[in-house]
């Protein structure tokens, strides 16, 4: 195979999702060689989706936005994941109250 491409143009899709503010002075082309550095990405579909990952993971594994991919619940996720996490946090809150009450009841008895 002789399909060797220039590093700068090797991953235009992921360069497009480079986070504009969270990476400081870093630039996608500059960091391409040091691809094990964790950097911030911004979703091309929804700018509210931001996540941290290595360039290597994105290029080699082809991973995209975890929110759009259903792997994380974002601020405006409309997937059942949001419902699930809301229910979960409610359950946790209930657990906290129950544990405290149980402890109190146990200590009193
Ligand atoms: Zn997304």
Image (cartoon, grey):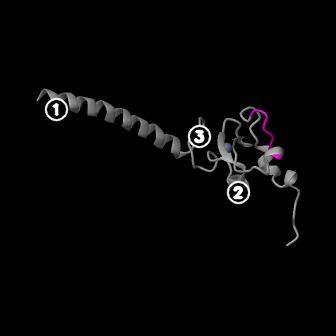
Judge the density around disc 3: few (<14), some (14-19), many (≥20) Cα neighbours within 10 Å.
Answer: some
- Residue that badge 3 annotates: 77
- Residue that badge 1 annotates: 106
Please report the residue visible at 88 percent of the width from the left and 70 percent of the height from the top: 2
Please report the residue visible at 83 percent of the width from the left and 50 percent of the height from the top: 12
Q: Is residue 3 left or right of residue 96?
A: right
Is 95 in front, or is 52? 52
Please report the residue visible at 22 percent of the width from the left and 31 percent of the height from the top: 103
Task: Using the numbered discs, state the Cα–Cα distance from disc 3 to disc 2 in whole angstroms.
Answer: 22 Å
Is 25 in front, or is 60? 25
Task: Using the numbered discs, state the Cα–Cα distance from disc 2 to disc 1 in whole angstroms.
Answer: 53 Å
Q: Is residue 63 left or right of residue 31?
A: left
Is 73 in front, or is 52? 52
Q: Secondary structure at mark 2?
A: loop
Position of the N terminus, as image quadrant, is: bottom right
- Residue that badge 2 annotates: 62
Location of residue 35 with respect to 88 vertically, above or below = below
Q: Is residue 45 left or right of residue 105?
A: right
1 or 3: mark nearer the eye: 1
Determine the main secondary structure of the stretch shown in magenta. Answer: loop
3 or 2: mark nearer the eye: 2
Is 43 in front, or is 58? 58
Please report the residue visible at 46 percent of the width from the left and 43 percent of the height from the top: 84
Location of residue 3 with respect to 79 vertically, above or below = below
Quadrant hosting residue 47:
top right
Task: Using the numbered discs, state the Cα–Cα distance from disc 1 to disc 3 in whole angstroms.
Answer: 41 Å
């Amino acid at each position: 195979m002789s399909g060797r491409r220039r590093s700068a143009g090797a991953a235009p899709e992921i360069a497009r999702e480079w986070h504009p503010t969270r990476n400081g002075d870093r630039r996608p082309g500059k960091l391409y060689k040091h691809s094990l550095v964790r950097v911030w990405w911004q979703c091309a579909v929804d700018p509210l989706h931001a996540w941290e990952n290595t360039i290597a993971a994105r290029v080699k594994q082809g991973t995209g936005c975890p929110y759009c991919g259903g792997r994380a619940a974002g601020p405006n996720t409309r997937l059942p994941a949001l419902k699930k996490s809301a229910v979960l946090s409610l359950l946790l809150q209930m657990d906290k109250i129950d544990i405290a009450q149980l402890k109190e009841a146990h200590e009193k008895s």
